[in-house]
Image (cartoon, rainbow, N blue to C red):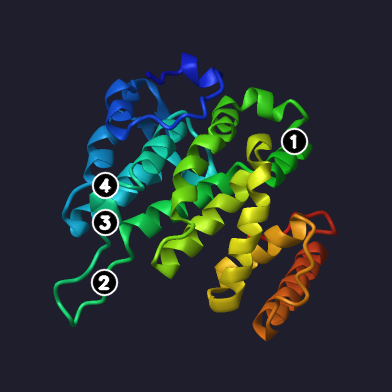
Amino acid sequence: MTYSRSQTEQPRPAALPPFQALLDSTDWASLATACGTGESLPAALTLLTSPNPLIRESALQDALGPVTHQNSIYEATVPVALYVAAILNHPAVTAGDYSQDAKTPPNRPTLVRLLEWLGNTTYDANDECVAIDERLCGEGFLDEYEEMRAFRDARPAFFSAVRALLGHDNADVRHTALVAAIPLMEHPLLAQHQAALASHARRLLATSTDRHHRDRVLDALKAWGHDTSGLENASDIAAREHYTLLRAARASWEGGCSEDPPF
């Protein structure tokens, strides 16, 4: 499977290729990034599976930053995202990152960082972002933005990897996996999994205090037609009221023509 400029025009298959095959068969130098081409990406991506957590940590920005700069989707974003999805079960990634020095706080596990990146990038290509851009650029926006269309076509492949982590023993991993899976549900082939994700979302709300995670799953449940009134705590209600005030203030500043803040 080789990715190049010409092939980014075609929909991506749902099957998730082996990470090494993807790394070896992709013509990285032909793919655009935020700062040129993807020629340096193979070396950085390879380091994401290093047994040394410090090396993995330093490789994250080099491997992921060039393909998601300023919330944009580039030609190299799809093969990078497929590679990230393919290494989510790699032993070096699943082992966790722990500091050898008790006085030094451990880094966030590579697995969590990769899931966060994949989820955030998926939100950058979700239906709401497409709708906003279509209002600004015209209804043919997605037809012309081949890179975003390719990324959206690959969502079933991403889900095949993220799904396996929804029941992970570590709460941070399974909650981050859930948040990453939510925007993937917009793909027509994945709608059947909404009910299962809703059950995971309820379990998250029963235990997690993470504001970002709670906001994401509450928004998802509401979008899927669930009544969340019995799931919200005092912090959720306060946050919702705060966001409402921010939206009203922003609408006032911009003359009533604005999009919601990116919470």
Q: Indicate the position of residue 157 as horizontal and vertical percent values.
A: 49, 35
Front position among marks 1 and 3: 3
| Residue 56 shown left or right of residue 86 in the figure | left
Mark seen at residue 48:
4
Q: Along the polypeptide, which appears first: circle 3 or circle 4?
A: 4
Q: Along the polypeptide, which appears first: circle 3 or circle 2?
A: 3
Mark seen at residue 57:
3
Mark 4: secondary structure: loop
CA separation, marks 3 and 2? 11 Å
Q: Along the polypeptide, which appears first: circle 4 or circle 2?
A: 4
Mark seen at residue 134:
1
Does residue 34 appear in this view? no
Q: Indicate the position of residue 71 as horizontal and vertical percent values.
A: 53, 46
CA separation, marks 1 and 2? 43 Å
Give the residue pinned by disc 2. 106
Mark 2: secondary structure: loop
Q: Identify whether 206 is placed above or below 127.
A: below
**Residue occupying image coordinates x 54% and y 29%:** 147
CA separation, marks 1 and 4? 36 Å
Q: In which quadrant of the rendered view does residue 87 lie?
A: top left
Front position among marks 3 and 4: 4
Q: Identify whether 87 is placed above or below 253.
A: above
Q: Indicate the position of residue 229 as horizontal and vertical percent values.
A: 78, 75
Q: How many marks?
A: 4
Does residue 44 appear in this view? yes
Q: Along the polypeptide, which appears first: circle 1 or circle 4?
A: 4
**Residue occupying image coordinates x 60% and y 41%:** 125
Amino acid type indicated by mark 2:
Pro
